[in-house]
Image (cartoon, rainbow, N blue to C red):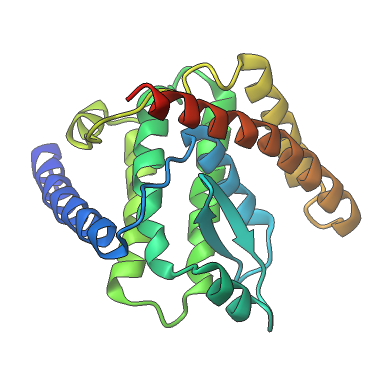
């Protein structure tokens, strides 16, 4: 398949997917969840280290995980979590690809590659998934893979009312710290005790950013 044909197929898929996103937002009749792009990619990457069947939920402008087990269903029901929340990943993923250059930053490249692994593992949480659910997750994987070396694809994948309010949220030292912790997670992924502690260390970093994200959103929306 040549590049032009591939881009045309992607463009058709993107238009269909964006129509789906708009319909879901109208159906939920809820305010949009604005997610920090890099925090989202890091949390998707962490799924690679979690138990199969772990699901995600999105609330308060944060992506959270819900481990498998007898309490997963009741927890998701009580919080209003549904698999249709997966459509909320579209914008932060595209913004991450647009705002961070994987080809020039090894730490970013590492984070994005791990996010692909996490999304692939997330599919195990939906064994009876509808075509839309699997399409969404496969679409995200494909987009991140292609976005690493296809600038034309990123031009097609436009996000309306793009909010770059998180441009200074992550310093280069922050990103390097995340990269180091990811290396530790990979190194000790079979040592449950150490894996837990390095995971918690990375979660604490993300929680600091979560508080700043909510403050930025509040400040930005107040000016609108």
Q: Give the left or right position of residue 42, taking residue 99 as reference.
A: right
Seen from the viewer's position, the closer of residues 173 and 57 is 57
Q: Give the left or right position of residue 23, taking residue 61 as reference.
A: left
Q: Quadrant of residue 131?
A: bottom left
Q: Position of residue 92 (x, y in %)?
A: 41, 39
Q: Quadrant of residue 75?
A: bottom right
Residue at 14% x, 41% y is: 7
Residue at 52% x, 33% y is: 38
Compared with 94, 119 (above or below) is below
Q: Position of residue 192 (x, y in %)?
A: 86, 58
Q: Quadrant of residue 4?
A: top left
How many labels were placed on the picture?
0
Which residue sits furthest right?
193
Q: Give the left or right position of residue 140, taking residue 156 as reference.
A: right
Compared with 81, 108 (above or below) is above
Which residue sits furthest front?
222
Compared with 13, 176 (above or below) is above
Residue 187 appears in the picture as rendered: no
Q: Position of residue 86 (x, y in %)?
A: 40, 59
Residue at 68% x, 67% y is: 51
Q: Position of residue 58 (x, y in %)?
A: 50, 55
Residue 74 appears in the picture as rendered: yes
Compared with 215, 88 (above or below) is below
Residue at 53% x, 72% y is: 125
Could you tell me which quadrant the C terminus lies in?
top left
Seen from the viewer's position, the closer of residues 136 and 75 is 75
Seen from the viewer's position, the closer of residues 80 and 146 is 80
Q: Give the left or right position of residue 96, taking residue 143 as reference.
A: right
């Amino acid at each position: 398949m040549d590049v032009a044909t591939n881009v045309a197929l992607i463009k058709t898929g993107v238009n269909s997917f964006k129509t789906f996103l708009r319909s879901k937002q109208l159906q939920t009749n809820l305010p949009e969840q604005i997610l920090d792009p890099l925090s989202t990619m890091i949390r998707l990457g962490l799924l690679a280290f979690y138990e199969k069947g772990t699901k995600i939920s999105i609330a308060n402008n944060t992506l959270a995980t819900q481990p498998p087990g007898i309490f997963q269903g009741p927890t998701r029901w009580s919080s209003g979590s549904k698999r249709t929340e997966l459509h909320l990943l579209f914008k932060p993923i595209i913004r991450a690809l647009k705002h961070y250059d994987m080809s020039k930053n090894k730490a970013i490249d590492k984070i994005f590659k791990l996010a692909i692994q996490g999304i692939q593992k997330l599919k195990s949480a939906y064994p009876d998934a509808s075509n839309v659910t699997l399409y969404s997750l496969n679409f995200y994987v494909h987009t991140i893979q292609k976005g690493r070396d296809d600038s034309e694809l990123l031009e097609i994948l436009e996000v309306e009312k793009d909010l770059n309010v998180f441009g200074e949220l992550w310093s280069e030292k922050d990103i390097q710290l995340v990269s180091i912790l990811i290396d530790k997670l990979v190194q000790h992924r079979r040592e449950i005790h150490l894996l837990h502690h390095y995971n918690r260390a990375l979660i604490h970093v993300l929680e600091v950013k979560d508080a700043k994200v909510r403050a930025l959103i509040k400040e930005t929306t107040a000016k609108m």
